[in-house]
Image (cartoon, coloured by chain):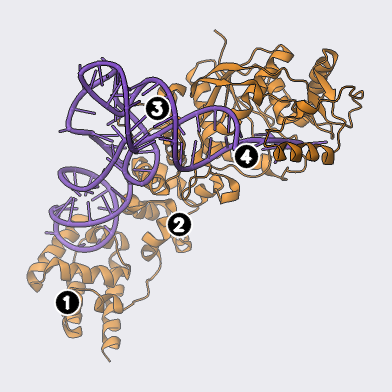
Amino acid sequence: MTSIRTRFAPSPTGYMHVGGVRTALFAWLLARQSPDGKFILRLEDTDQKREVAGSAEHLIESLHALGIVYDEGPDIGGPYAPYKQSERLDSYRKWAQKLIDAGRAYADPYTAEQIEAFRNQSRDEKRAFLYRDHRPTNPPVWDGKMPLRFKSDPKSYSWHDEVMGDLHSGPEVIDDIIIIKSDGYPTYNFAHIIDDAEMNISHIIRGQEFLSSQPNYMNLYEALNIKAPLFATVPHILGESGNKKLGKRDGAKDVLDYFKDGYLQEAMINFIASMGWNDGSEQEIFSSAELIEKFSLARIQHSGARFDEKRLLWLNGQWIRKLSLDDLYNRCAEFWPESANQVGDDVKKQVLALVQDRLKTLADLPLLTSYFFAEPTPDWTMTTNNNQLSKLSTDEIVTLLNHAKEALSNSNYDADSLQQTLNSLLETTGQKPGILFTLIRIAVSWAPFSPALNETLSTIGRDKVQSRLQNAIQAAESASK
RNA sequence: GGUCUCAUCGUCUAACGGUUAGGACGCCAGGUUCUCAUCCUGGCAAUCCGGGUUCGAUUCCCGGUGAGAUCACCA
């Protein structure tokens, strides 16, 4: 059995969105399942007009960020280099010449206007347009300035797709496609066939949009006498609203933006893999290692999957909670509020431990933690708007705050001691936790929510708690005037 | 319009032709001595329609319908 070699072959025309990532991911998983499998990155840069500067680097950065590591590629080389189509023109020229010599390719003598006229005519007659109906009887010698067309041999095909199963097509879909453009570059339709053959690709994994050109590819494989690889057609990912294929034009997001927004690599991989694939069990959380172990083309869904950001958010939370504190801490470097810079790693780590269960994305960090590092600004309406606290007079609140300040000043500032202090404070004041704890929480954080009170106090520290309680008392007094 | 593909809760999906059609996200309700989150419990919610085959169809077949893709000197 020949070894598994799969490739991801994007064109450098922009960024990667989840649709492209999934194709790459599936190809990568398939290669990694086999001990000697290889995953190849190939740049399909044959359209100079659409090329976007820097996008090749951007694509490579995206794959690195996702942990989808390729074994051969334009920046790292490999046994079948170069991995950039613009550097393989000689090869396409050579194969094209074989077709010309065999009478299976010819120069296209028509102008764009003439072809357009043919098209219009077909449309008026309500027939499908086929270029081969207009094949020139005496085509000129190809001078490299005209497009070179494949002379097709229309016939029916039946073939097997590793995902979709058995597929069929009739001769009416076979046409004389352009294989070399007038600028000398090959079309995708031609170049990928040559490259996949020369690079010994075993499986072509690509999106459904190529299904309708598949018969033309079969026809080319035959004319070139190339043994076709295995095909695996992956359904589309649909946009969040509407049923359209997810695409850049509809605002599909750059995957790197998800990382900037605080999503974890593991969550992205887990999420993208689970759109259109599952292992048949009820497992929801998969690591890359598990995906490699369990992935199979046969269990890929046949219909499109809609992108559900809520589910991604949930998965991200799951993965954040799964990480060890140290691991999580290392990934948070870019997300702390500015005020956190003034404290050491130990303090930040302590704070992180408190909020780990509360993070949906790493970008939630400032919202959840800023009052640990910077003095919060009292906002007295937080007490007056509170259902419980609004029942108390300002005097009563000040009295409670004073009691709290007094009691807390004598506590050992570990979480257990603080809980004891707080519990006895409940008894001495005769208040319910709903009042007392809420008040203290607001007074030291001025935040809508926070972790458990004893741990929050412990982490903030005695001195700051004392001064914040004092500030709260002053805020109460100035509010009552 | 031609061709191809697809069709289970709102979403992602499971179910050798025999299940009260299962799980997850989301949503709702309750619990975990305060908030938020986590966690736990419970609830709502689906086989596109019509035929056929069969003792029995989400599953197989046919026909509709709906959705998507594609018909470029883009990939």
What shade does chain A have?
A: orange
Whether tag 4 and tag 3 are in contact, CB under 8 A, the answer is no
Mark 3 or mark 1: name the one nearer the start of the chain. 3
Shade of chain B as shown in the rendered figure: purple
The 10 Å Cα crowd at callout 4, few under 14, some 14 to 19, many 20 or more, is many
Rounded to the nearest angstrom, the CA distance separating label 2 from label 3 is: 31 Å
Q: Which mark is residue A151?
A: none
The local secondary structure at tag 4 comes to helix
Distance from Cα at disc 1 to Cα at disc 2:
33 Å
Nearer to us in this view, A250 or A66: A250
Amino acid at the residue labelled 2: Trp
The residue that disc 1 covers is A400
Q: Position of residue A327 (x, y in %)?
A: 41, 42
Residue A396 spot, x, y in % from top left: 16, 82
Residue B68 or residue A409, whichever sits in front: B68
What amino acid is found at the position of numbered circle 4 in the picture? Answer: Leu
Say left or right for A22 vs A131.
left
- Mark 4 vs mark 3: tell me if same chain: yes
Q: Residues within 10 Å of mark 1 (few under 14, many from 20)?
A: many
Quadrant where the C terminus of chain A sits is bottom left
Q: What's the CA distance linking mark 3 and mark 1?
A: 54 Å
Give the residue number, with chain letter if any, for mark 3.
A290
Q: Say few, some or many: other residues with alpha carbon within 10 Å of mark 2 (under 14 / 14 to 19 / 20 or more).
A: many
Q: Which residue is mark 4?
A: A59
Q: Position of residue A321 (x, y in %)?
A: 34, 44
From the viewer's perspective, is A155 left or right of A280? right
Q: Are marks 1 and 4 on the same chain?
A: yes
Q: CA distance from mark 4 to mark 3?
A: 25 Å
Residue highlighted by disc 2: A336
Tell which residue pokes out farthest to the top in this image: A1
